[in-house]
């Protein structure tokens, strides 16, 4: 009802991401076609601006939807206000308070009411970049409300500052595959190989926070482990820059290039079924369609890379499910996703 007296400002769409991708810890990421989409409505006035947001019920499994700190509003929506710790609203105020001019703040404060209608396809807290996508959404909304033109480079630096690591935000901003160096800069290799692979994502019934996943990592590493991972990360980056026809001839090298001993083995120990899933690589190493496995982000989601057109894919999916079922874990969601090459989109309402 309130939207009838409000003006639609814009629609913002931000893709999800998978990050780390084997040895690329905190630096390599990939944008995938699953989105958080937000419509922004405003009403001008003289009161202090109030931001409200309504989340339209997503198609995700119930346990992967927004739940904490939210109040139900009917069967299909969740209602929040600016008093919550919501990432989108926090990022809006980061821009308003710290990154826009006095003229921009005046533009923001010219709104009595700001209404956000948010439809989220990204499962929450499973290693698919939901927090990064929400932060980027808030930054972009803040820029629009302050009438401040934020370049992609500025969005990148702001998102890194808020999130604390770049690998999950950079692909959602830039699209495609990205390699990031903290808040310094990023590289976007062609990474054409991902166009030729089925990217399968499995979300098991396991809860692991990013904080706990980081605590599981050792404070010191053996030199041999560092060398092992540097060799594979360097090889992976080199493969991502090769013509796709060359990479397709090297499935074993790509499999090996996804290996690491810096983070995955320690995180997998927190996620029943994941060590067995990662162990499928040894069984499938001679399959010319198989290109490797990895944990997505901090987990618990996992990635399976397989060349398109394989007649064995359904049988392999059953084997993947068994890895988790044998540990009494169900797969809540599974997706077959493709790369988003553009990053976020802002569609202004004319």
Image (tube, rainbow, N blue to C red):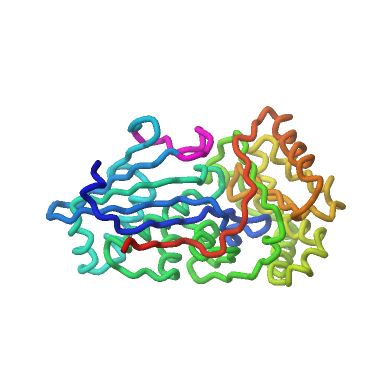
Residue ID at (78%, 42%)? 316
The single residue placed furthest to the left in the displayed view is 46
Depth check, front residue: 34 or 27: 34
Residue 72 x/y as whole percent: 35, 32
Which image quadrant for residue 220?
bottom right
- Report if residue 258 is visible in the image: yes
User: What secondary structure is the magenta-colored segment mainly?
Assistant: loop
Which image quadrant for residue 13?
bottom left
Q: Is residue 225 above or below residue 104?
A: above
Q: In which quarter of the image is the C terminus?
A: bottom left
Q: In which quarter of the image is the N terminus?
A: top left
Which image quadrant for residue 140?
bottom left
Instruction: Using residue 205 as the reference point, say whether residue 51 is left or right of it.
Output: left
Depth check, front residue: 58 or 322: 58
Residue 143 x/y as whole percent: 32, 63
- Report if residue 211 is visible in the image: no
Residue 328 x/y as whole percent: 68, 27
Q: What stretch is highlighted in magenta?
A: 58-71
Query: In the image, is residue 66 part of the stretch drawn in magenta?
Result: yes
Depth check, front residue: 42 or 246: 42
Residue 166 x/y as whole percent: 51, 60
The single residue placed furthest to the right in the displayed view is 286
Residue ID at (64%, 38%)? 271
Residue ID at (34%, 51%)? 90
Query: In the image, is residue 131 part of the stretch drawn in magenta?
Result: no
**Number of marks:** 0
């Amino acid at each position: 009802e309130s939207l009838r007296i409000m003006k639609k400002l814009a629609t913002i769409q931000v893709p999800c991401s998978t990050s780390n991708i084997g040895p690329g810890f905190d630096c390599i990421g990939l944008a995938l076609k699953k989105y958080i989409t937000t419509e922004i409505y405003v009403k001008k006035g003289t009161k202090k601006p109030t931001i409200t947001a309504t989340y339209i019920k997503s198609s995700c499994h119930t346990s992967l939807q927004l739940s904490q700190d939210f109040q139900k509003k009917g069967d299909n929506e969740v209602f929040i206000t600016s008093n919550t710790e919501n990432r989108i609203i926090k990022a809006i105020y980061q821009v308003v308070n710290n990154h826009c001019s006095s003229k921009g703040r005046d533009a923001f404060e010219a709104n009595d009411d700001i209404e956000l209608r948010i439809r989220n396809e990204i499962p929450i807290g499973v290693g698919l970049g939901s927090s990064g996508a929400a932060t980027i959404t808030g930054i972009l909304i803040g820029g629009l409300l302050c009438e401040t033109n934020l370049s992609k480079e500025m969005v990148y630096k702001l998102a890194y500052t808020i999130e604390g690591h770049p690998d999950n935000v950079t692909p959602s901003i830039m699209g495609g595959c990205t390699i990031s160096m903290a808040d310094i800069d990023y590289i976007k290799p062609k990474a054409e190989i991902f166009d030729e692979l089925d990217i399968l994502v499995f979300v098991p019934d396991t809860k692991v926070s990013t904080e706990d996943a980081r605590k599981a990592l050792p404070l010191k590493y053996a030199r041999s482990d560092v060398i092992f991972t540097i060799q594979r990360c360097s090889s992976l980056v080199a493969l991502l820059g090769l013509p796709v026809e060359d990479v397709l001839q090297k499935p074993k090298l790509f499999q090996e290039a996804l290996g690491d001993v810096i983070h995955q083995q320690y995180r997998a120990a927190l996620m029943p079924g994941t060590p067995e899933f990662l162990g499928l690589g040894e069984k499938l190493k001679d399959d010319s369609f198989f290109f490797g496995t990895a944990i997505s982000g901090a987990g618990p989601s996992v990635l399976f890379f397989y060349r398109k057109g394989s007649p064995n894919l359904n049988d392999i999916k059953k084997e993947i499910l068994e890895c988790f079922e044998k540990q009494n874990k169900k797969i809540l969601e599974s997706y077959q996703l493709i790369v988003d090459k553009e990053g976020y989109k802002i569609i202004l309402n004319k």
